[in-house]
Image (cartoon, helix red, strand yellow):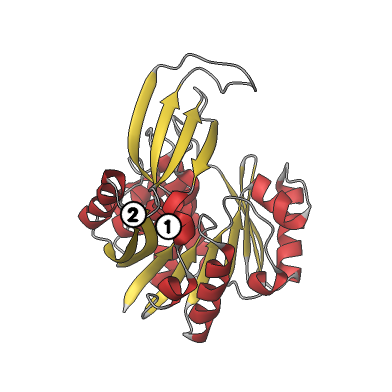
Amino acid sequence: MTDVVVLGGLNTDFLVRGPRLPRPGETVRGWEFQQSLGGKGANQAVAAARLDASVRMIGRVGADERGRALIAGLTAEGVDTAAVGVDPDGATGAALVSVAADGAKQILTAPGANFSLGIVDATGALGDARVLLLQLEVPLDTVCAAVRAARAAHMLVVLDAGPPVPLPAALIAELDVIRANALEAHVLTGVGVHDRASAAAAAQVLLYRGAGAAIIGAPGGDLLLDAAGETWLPHIDVPTVDATGAGDAFAGALAAELAAGRPLGAAVTFANAAAAIATTIAGAQAGLPLRSDVLGLLERA
């Protein structure tokens, strides 16, 4: 049985680092450019694989060199890519990422082939897995169908709610765990998240709508709410370079730990440390940690 099957986006990231993020209409001179493998789905698949989970990726790329590079990169990380299809008519997805000196980021994406991932492609490739991990860089109808199929197969279902879009109530009610940052939580619930209390209020809305557990990112930390109660996990103090990929490190680590049978609270604690490490290196996949890295940080924290 596969530990984690990831259904989601695969992109090429074009990243520029500079002193600050540009305002509308403004050009800011940066000092570093990187082209790297990315996409929330691909990042989360690599994150889980580096933490010793067996991982299968479901997604779509274009029939171009960037798509071939994404498949090769996943394969090199030990991810099963048999269910990564090739769209003969669409380009591989791309993301333009701006990162400021303090780690703040802006991302503009062109989904390309990601949006040709169909329902039959997704549900037919789920197979036998412990955890289904999804995001929202592929069509929402495909996400909904995959969640229904996974529930019927008795998988744990974890949704990382990015990029932010409103979700049907029927989908939220099928989720074992939903994770959202402050902006995503606002889109989903209408609650502006600016501290622990407002994060708890947003999480309450998601549990009222049927989610088994909600994890809300807020300034200073992450708030977990489930039937056992509320847990606050402060961000771990590390020298932050680039926050790109931190959320994906969190989601991949969470899925890997749940697939290994860890309790949700312990899995979230582990994921919080994985996300912290991911901010210390520029690039979405470059900073994704190994298990020994995460355990080492938890020992020191």
The residue lying at 36 percent from left, 79 percent from top is 127
Give the residue at mark 2.
Answer: 46
The dot on residue 283 is none
The reply to whether callout 2 and callout 1 are in contact (CB within 8 Å) is: yes
Position of 300 with respect to 173 (left or right) is left
The image shows residue 265, relative to residue 124, as above or below, that is above
Q: State the residue lying farthest toward the front.
A: 89
Quadrant, the N terminus: bottom left
The residue lying at 37 percent from left, 50 percent from top is 294
Q: Quadrant of residue 128?
A: bottom left
Query: Which label's residue is closer to the chain start, 2 or 1?
Result: 2
Q: Which amino acid does the dot numbered 1 rest on?
A: Gly
Disc 1 is placed on an element classified as helix
The image shows residue 172, relative to residue 78, as above or below, that is below
The image shows residue 124, relative to residue 184, as above or below, that is below
Give the residue at mark 1.
Answer: 252
Quadrant, the C terminus: top left
Q: Quadrant of residue 178?
A: bottom right
| Residue 100 at x, y percent in the picture | 51, 24
The residue lying toward the viewer, choosing from 204 and 66, is 66
Q: State the residue lying farthest toward the top.
A: 29
| Residue 292 at x, y percent in the picture | 29, 51
Position of 213 with respect to 66 (left or right) is right
Q: Which amino acid does the dot numbered 2 rest on?
A: Val
Disc 2 is placed on an element classified as helix
